[in-house]
Image (cartoon, rainbow, N blue to C red):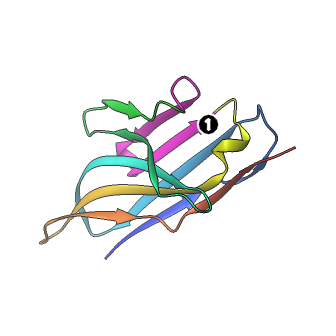
């Protein structure tokens, strides 16, 4: 059994910063790509940022230069540092991690979601 636990969301003023964390635990044999998605009310879920096992990163154009994704392989954790936050960044943020469990195939696991609200 594998679990992803997210933390770090909250309410922040425009221009502020937040750091999201997503820790994977359980019967993990290997982890590949890790990423963050977000879904605003009435909109489709979209990719925010992703990082490969080798450390290559990919960002949505709307967050380039403001958000930074990183990972700590020893802790099976992925982070999203969000700076210069804007009201349009308001959404529920989800982490997604490609995990191979012991004795199983690769599977994309999802976190429970954490609310990020940017408002004055």
Q: Find residue 9 and report its horizontal and vertical position in percent.
A: 66, 54
Indicate left or right for 5 with 120 as reference: left
Q: Main secondary structure of the magenta part?
A: strand
Q: Along the line of sight, which residue is nearer the eye, 95 or 101?
A: 95
> Which residue is pictured at 79% across the width and 36% down the height?
14
For the residue labelled by badge 1, is the local secondary structure a helix, a strand or a loop?
Answer: strand
97 falls in the magenta region: no
Q: Find residue 37 and report its horizontal and vertical position in percent.
A: 46, 51
Quadrant location of residue 2?
bottom left
Whether residue 99 is situated above or below residue 57 in the rendered picture: below
Question: Can residue 25 be spotted in the picture?
Answer: yes
> Which residue is pictured at 37% across the width and 41% down the height?
50
Tell me which segment is drawn in magenta: 63-82
Q: Along the line of sight, which residue is nearer the eye, 29 or 59?
A: 59
Neighbour tally class for label 1: few under 14, some 14-19, many 20 plus, Cα within 10 Å: many
Locate the N terminus by quadrant: bottom left
> Which residue is pictured at 69% across the width and 29% down the height?
84
Q: Find residue 98 and report its horizontal and vertical position in percent.
A: 27, 56
> Which residue is pictured at 81% across the width and 46% down the height?
119
Q: Find residue 109 and report its horizontal and vertical position in percent.
A: 34, 65
Q: Hey, which residue is sitting farthest bottom in the picture?
A: 1
Q: Along the line of sight, which residue is nearer the eye, 52 or 31?
A: 52
Locate the C terminus by quadrant: top right
Question: Can residue 8 be spotted in the picture?
Answer: no
Whether residue 90 is situated above or below residue 105 in the rendered picture: above
Residue identified by numbered label 1: 82
67 falls in the magenta region: yes
Whether residue 100 is situated above or below residue 58 in the rendered picture: below
């Amino acid at each position: 059994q594998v679990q992803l636990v997210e933390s770090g969301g909250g309410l922040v003023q425009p221009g502020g910063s937040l750091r999201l964390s997503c820790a994977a635990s359980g019967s993990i044999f290997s982890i590949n790509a890790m990423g963050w998605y977000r879904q605003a009310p009435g909109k489709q879920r979209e990719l925010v940022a992703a990082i490969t096992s080798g450390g290559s990163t990919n960002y949505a154009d709307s967050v380039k230069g403001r958000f930074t994704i990183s990972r700590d392989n020893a802790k099976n954790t992925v982070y999203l540092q969000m700076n210069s936050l804007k009201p349009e960044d308001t959404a529920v943020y989800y982490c997604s991690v490609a995990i191979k469990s012991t004795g199983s195939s690769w599977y994309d696991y999802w976190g429970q979601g954490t609310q990020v609200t940017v408002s004055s």
